[in-house]
Each structure stands twice: as C-alpha cells, then as structure tokens.
Amino acid sequence: MIIKAGIILLILLISLMFPGVINKTNAKIGGRKGAPVLQVLYDNIRLLKKGNVYSRTTGFVFRLAPLVYFASILSCVLFIPLGNHKAVFSFDGDFVLFAYLMALGRFFMILAAMDTGSGFEGMGANREAYYSMLAEPAFFIVIASLSLFTDHTSFYDLFNHLHPQSNLSYLIAFLAIYVFSLLALAENSRLPVDDPKTHLELTMVHEVMILDHSGFDLALIQLAGGLKFAIYGALIHNLAVPVSLPFALQLAILLGVEVIFAMIVGVMESLRARNKMMKNPQWLIAISALAVIAFLAVLIITRKFSLV
Amino acid sequence: MAVFLVIVALSLVLFLVPKKFLYPLAFGLQALIIIFTSYLAVRAFAEPEALRIFFFRLTDNDIYLVIDRMSAFFVLTINLTLFTGILYAKGYLKSYYGSKNTSELALHYFSFVWLHLSMLLVCVLRDGLGFLVAWELMSLSSFFLVIFESEKKDIIRTGIQYLIQMHIGLAFLITAFLLAGMKSGGTIGFDGLPAYFDHYKSFGVFLLFFAGFGIKAGFIPFHTWLPHAHPAAPSHVSGVMSGVMIKMGLYGILRVLTSVHDGLLQIGVFILAVSLVSGIAGIILALVQQDIKKMLAYSSIENVGIIGTGIGLGTIGTAAGIPALAVLGYSGAFLHIFNHSLFKSMLFYASGNVYRQTHTRNMDQLGGLAKTMPATAFFFLLGATAIAGLPPLNGFISEFLLYSGMFRSLSASDFSLSLVLLGGIIGLVLIGGLTLYCFTKAFGIVFLGNARSDRPSHAREAERSMLFPLLFISLFMAAIGIFPFLIAEPLGKIVTIFVPDASLLNAALPPLSGISIVFAFLFLVIFLLFLLRSRLEKKRTVTMDSTWGCGNTAADPALNQYTARSYADYIETFTRHLAGVKKKYDPIEKDEIFPAGRTYESHNTDVFEDRLISGPTGRLMAFLEKIAVFQTGNIQHYLLYAIVFIAIVILLTLMGVMS
C-alpha cells in the first residue's frame, strides 16, 4: 500500500518538474540561463490563487471540462505499475480503459473549445480530434505486439513477462519505446506536431484550445499536461527496465529515465522545426506504421510466420 | 393466441375512436403487449430450453412461437425501446394534432402498434412462411410510419424507395429459405436450416441470407435506404427504427448462424471484413453530414458495423477453437445491440426536441442550444459520450468486451488469424477515434458556441413528456456503464446459444468489477475538484467577459466560428473518394481588393449509393429515354411496328426458329 502510494507520489512529483526540465534544456542549448526547473509549478500555484474569467458564450460544458480532463489523467496515473508492484487499478484489459480515459479527457477539452464559439478554438478542437484519431492506433498496435509476445493482457503482466522470455525482447522493447516516445510528443502537443511556444493562433493545436481558460481551470489543464508526460515516461521505464532489479534502484532509474526523456524532448525541440500542418497526418500515420513493424517482428520471433 | 387476437381486435378499434382517445388507447395496447411478452421473455430467459407456445394451425402445419434466450433478449430490447418510443411520441405528435385528421393519426398509431407486434413475431417465429409474413408486416408498418408527413413530396419518394429496397431484401430471403428448404428436403424455415448446412456448402446460401438481412441491418453496401428513411420519419419513429428495427436484420443473421457448423472461419472473416468497412465508412459518411438526423442514420451504420465485428469475431472464435474470442465477441455484439438501442434512440429523441423547437435539422443553422435547452443538451451529451465508446457509460463496456476478446486471443491464433485480429483492433480504434471526431462535431455545433442563424433564438426547453423518456434511458445507460458486472451473468446466458460449454464462459468473461472502482475514483476526483473550485471561487472574483477574439471585437459571433462543414474539412479532403463533397463557389481573385458578395454551395454524396443505385438507375433511365423515340404518338408508326412484328414472326417461323 505504502509502496503504491510512493510510486504515485513520485510520478506526481516528476510531472511537476517535467516541463521545467524541457524548458531548461531548451534554454541551455539556446545559450540562455532559463527559468528554474520548478517554474511551471510556481506558475500553477499563482494560477490557483487567481479568480476565473469566463466567456459569456460558454456554459456548463466549459466549466466541467477541465475537471473531467484532470480527473481522467489522474486516474490514468493509477494504472501504471512499477517493477513487480501492481498498479492500484490492474485487471485484464486495463490498457483499453487507460486509453479510453485519456480519450474522455480529450473529448471534454474539445467540447470546451467548441463552447467558446471562437473560430480559433474551433480550429484547435478540430485539429485535436483529427490528429488524435490518427495517432490512436499506434498505442493499441504496440500493446497488441506486447500481448502477442507475452500472452498477457494487463499492463502489469505485459511488463513483467516481457524480458524473462528471451533476449529478443529488447528488440520489441526498443521499437515500443520509440513508438511511445513519438506518441508522447503527439499526445502532449509538442514538436514536431505542435509548437507550444508559438504565438500565432493559426498555427497552434493545443494552446489555441485553451485560450479562454484561466485561473484554477488553466492550472488543472497544465498540471494534467505534465502528468501525461510523466505517465508516458513511466511506461517507457517499464519497457526498458527488467523487473528483477531491486525496488530502490527501480525508483532511481525511473527518475533518471524521466529526466533523460525530458532532456531529449528539450534537445529535439531546440534543434528542429515544427512540421507543416499538412505534413502532420503523414507523421502520425507513420507512428502506426512503425508499430505494425513491431507487431510483425513479434510474429517472426514467436515463429508464427514461417515460409512453410 | 387469444391474447394475440384481442390485441389485433383492439388495434382495429384505433380507427373508430375520436382523436383524443387515440394516444391513450395506443399506449394501453402497447403496455399490454409489453407486459405480456416481457413476462414470457423473462420466463424463457430462466430456462436453458426454448419456450414453445402453440400459435395457430395452418392447413396441416402447427405453428409455434419459440422463445429461446436470444429471442427473449431481443423481445426485451424491443419492448424497452418501443416503450420509450410511445412515451416520447406523446409530446412529439402533439403539434401534428392540428394539421392531421383523425384517420391519419389513427393509421400512424396503428402502424406503430403493428411495428411493435411484427418485430416481436419476427423474433419468435421459426417457421419460414410465418417469419416472412411477420417480416413483411414489419416493413409495411414501418413504411406507413416513415411517410407520416406524406404531404411532402420527397417524403413519399423516400418512402417508396424504402419499400422497394425492403422488398429486394425480402426476395433474397425467400430465395435463401426456398433454396435451403428444397435442397435438404426438410421444412422451410429456421428449423430446416441445420439439415441444409450440415450437408451442403454453407457459404453461398449464407451469403443470400446475409444480403437479405443485411439490407435491413444497414451493412454497407446495403445501407442506402437508411440515410433517407431516418431523417424523413418523425423522431420517435427514427429512434425506434434505428434503435431496434435494424437489429432485426442482425437477429436474422445470428439466427442463421446458430445452424451453421461448417465453413465458419470463412463466414466469420467475411462478416468481420464487411463490418469493419461498414463501421469505418459509415462513421466517415456521418462525419461529413450537415443534417443531424442523417448524421445519426450514418452513425447507426457504423454501430451495426461494431456489432457485426463482434459477431464476426465470435464466429471466428468458434471456428478456430478459441473460446475467449467466441464468448467475448458474441457477448460484445449482444451488449452493443442493447447499448445502441439505448443511446441511439436517446440521440434521435434529443434531436427531435431540437427539431421541434427550431424547425431545422441543418446543423449549420443551429448553435448555442445548451443555454436555452440545457436538459436536452445534457442528454445529448450523455448519448454522444456513450456512442463514442467513452467511459463511464455503456458504450465503453461493449467495446471493452470486443477489445478484450481480440487481445486475449492474439497468442492463441496462427499467423493469418493474428493479422485478422490486428486488423480488427486497428479498425475498432479508428472507428472510436472517428466517432469522437463526429460527435464532438455534432454536440459542439448544435449545442455549443453561438447561434448560427436566428432559428435557435426562440428555442425553449422541451416539455416534460419529451424529456422523461430520455431520463429513463439514461438510467439504463449509466447502470450498465458504472456497474458492468451486473450484466455479465445475463450476457453469459445468451451466449450459451453459441458457446454451449458454460465452464469456458466463466473463464472468458473478464472481471468487470475493476472498471467500477476506476469510475468511482474518477467521479470522486471530479466531485472533489468541483468542491475545491467552488470554495476558491467564493473568495475570488469571477468575471464574465467576451471570448478571446485576437483583438477583433467587430466580428459577427454567429459567423466567426466553425460550421458543420468546416469542422469536417480534414476528413473531407482525406476521404474525398468515399464521401465526395462537391463545393460550388467563386474563389477570390488576387486583384480583387474589395471582394463582392458571393454564394457558396456544398453537397455531399455517398459513393456506394452513387455507384450502386443512382448510377445504374440513372443510366437505365437514360437508355429508356433513348428507346422512347419509338413512342412517337403517330398511329401510322404504331401500325408499322405491328406489321414489322408480324413479319418477323412469320420469317422466324419459316426459318424454323420458332416451332
């Protein structure tokens, strides 16, 4: 029980500093000093202290959406196992609920954007719906590959039976990690799909959806953004690290994986430009294509595919 | 039988009573039917053996009503939806009481009662002739329901088109029944099918059945009646037609499948493929619609696709000997049949409320209704969440069963089956993503933002009798969504028809109670956050202001937002060959500094309808018109034709061709 709470607490802590690490890396590469790593936390605390400004056009959906969004992402945190410790919510097919909870949050954020009656936010809503539809299959294909490989269907069992099988598991894990990293970028609206630093509404995806949120609601949305990154980081950790390692070491590695992941995102964001809007669908479909390669690799490894 | 005759007699009385007694009589009749048949269904459900009731004697042939668990399930589903349908009809038909005369209304109620009766009979009759008669009654009564607003020309046209397509379906069914019955020398009807399928190749005749039932169910490419008939019918009728009537096609397919034991793999893969195509193409076509009821009609095609996916997976599971896939596939299909009957009728009723208030179904003229019609908006939101398969509502549970089935069977399947399952998973995920896209559009454009024309300006909340059915349905939806473990047992009982071994059943159904705990946590967090925000807001100032407009405050709020058309623009370009959208406008030239006013038109088409129905019939008509040159109206010409004809006959006889 205490261990489970500890894991959740660690993920929550990581989520608070994740965006800060990205920004710090960005700043260092750009030759700037950069804001403190916990600046995002300070910003959110200040937001929590502020009153809300609502648009007159909006109604109950707009007020409900940030709560549902944050609650659904927070519930997703409780699906993440660590090492040989089960998550709070762990049952067969839990990853389906995990993915659909994320979708629930997205659904309400899209509706909240539509509720403002703004052309800009409609643009963001529309792009979010389209891009997420294109990105969604990749997650399921990767999980299908893992479950084909391990013959199990819950996060805990998938990760626990991944590595003891054979050394070939690292091949699968590598592909899966790569796909999850790309997905994390797409899900969190980072480069190259979307640029969180852009100042032109016409080129935004996520930022333009939350133009009218303020105060408490905005803080929730930003905290949820950090959580999403931390969740993906934890999934990547689970794929990469064998469960046999001691627990304390696992925790340390988790912290390391998350920091490195954030730094990689930061480095990448400093070095490359955003995709053209029209290129995004291709980029997103390519993730699923990569995931299919993972699936085919598992078919070959498990000897289901033979020429006879 | 006696009860049946009483109901028939009472339904005829509908034509005799004055206007104000019509609704009470129809309601009472349906209540009688519902109570009686539900009692029988519940009794049948308890027993593993089918309940057989003597119905009547036809020459030397006894006809029985046979209620097994599958029939009982369909009977209960029908009763529930027809109950909300007649409840909703009270408010919806009120405005027609002025313009329609007594006999028109009586015919409407009469058809509604008979649609109910005929659907129940379809589910319990096994005899070929009896089944086909009930099937035909169902088509006819729904035809009269569709053409309720018969003073409109295009509604009559749609009705006739519907009637013709239903009879093409009937022709397939008659052929299939006769073929199977004659070849095996047994009885014509469902009871004769096992004898046929056990001795002959099953795929051909199954295909005939699939085509016949598929037209009713709305599988692509047999779906072309759906997007026309649903918008034409009054909302309580569309809700019932889409909620349960199209499921009769699925019932037929399932009933035929119970008799097939060989060649199931082929059949399963075929159903799965057709279903995934129906699902994806259906929802893409739904996404590009502007007419809200047409959108819902296409989304029914998508949902039939999801159900078909379940049936296909179940069949494959049975064929490949993977019990988990068979159990979860079939139970997912059955649960989705029930779920869809709930949320689709809810969405149709809610859009009926919108239509009643605004007199338009065009989404581009609506907007901002959540403020004037909050209860309707809330129920539509529930329906949209459920239909997108999102937790914590019932739509998620049935999709969860399908996903579980596919993921669990991956390692047990061989190479090609793994790929089939992967295709199923990708298809279902895509359908999910597209549905989310489609219903954020539907809810967002109709209920959120600002009004796009002055139509919604006079809208008021619908009256209680038009909201109560929605509340009633939403309770079922929430119950299945939040307490899914409650339905595991009844579902398992239905599935025993396909997977008789009960021990396999219990092993396969996943522990659904885990889901409830997650939802409890989700609700708790939302509630706590809400409390926290309310407390914080008391201490701070909450300001109301206008939406961020990038500094531009002069823009017309009605125009400065997304429309149904532009929201779907990405999909339109992505899938232009499937849902061809034709736009007509003059582009703004470079040297046009002050652009003048312009018009913009857009139409969307359905590629299947164009290629399969409009295209061929159009060509046929063009050809027939060319032939019409012979029809000159000149008596001399007609005499000449007669002489030529006689000359040809004589010539052919002389040459010995006609002897």
Image (spheres, coloured by chain):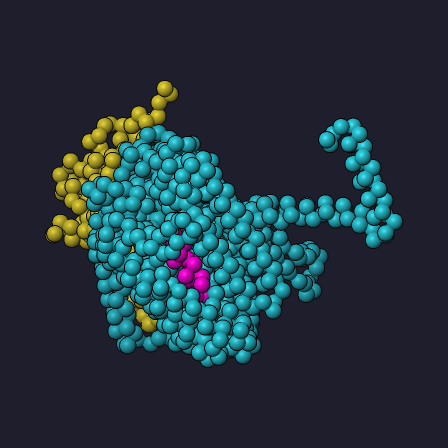
Q: Is residue A248 magenta?
A: no
Which residue is drawn at the image coordinates 18% and 37% (left, top)? Answer: A243
Which residue is drawn at the image coordinates 35% and 65% (left, top)? Answer: B3
Residue B463's place in the image compared with B327, above or below, is: below
User: Which chain's colour is yellow?
Assistant: A
**Which image quarter holds the N terminus of chain B?**
bottom left
Q: Is residue A151 visible?
A: yes
Pinpoint residue B589: horizontal percent, then vertical percent.
Answer: 69, 56
Q: Residue furthest front?
A: B60
**Which image quarter holds the C terminus of chain B?**
top right
Pinpoint residue B425: horizontal percent, then vertical percent.
Answer: 37, 42
Pinpoint residue B111: horizontal percent, then vertical percent.
Answer: 48, 65
Q: Residue furthest left?
A: A2
Residue B546's place in the image compared with A10, above or below, is: below
Which residue is drawn at the image coordinates 56% and 68% (left, top)? Answer: B149
| Magenta segment boundaries in residue numbering | B112-125
Pinpoint residue B514: horizontal percent, then vertical percent.
Answer: 21, 52
Q: Is residue B654 left or right of residue B194?
A: right
User: Which chain's colour is cyan?
Assistant: B
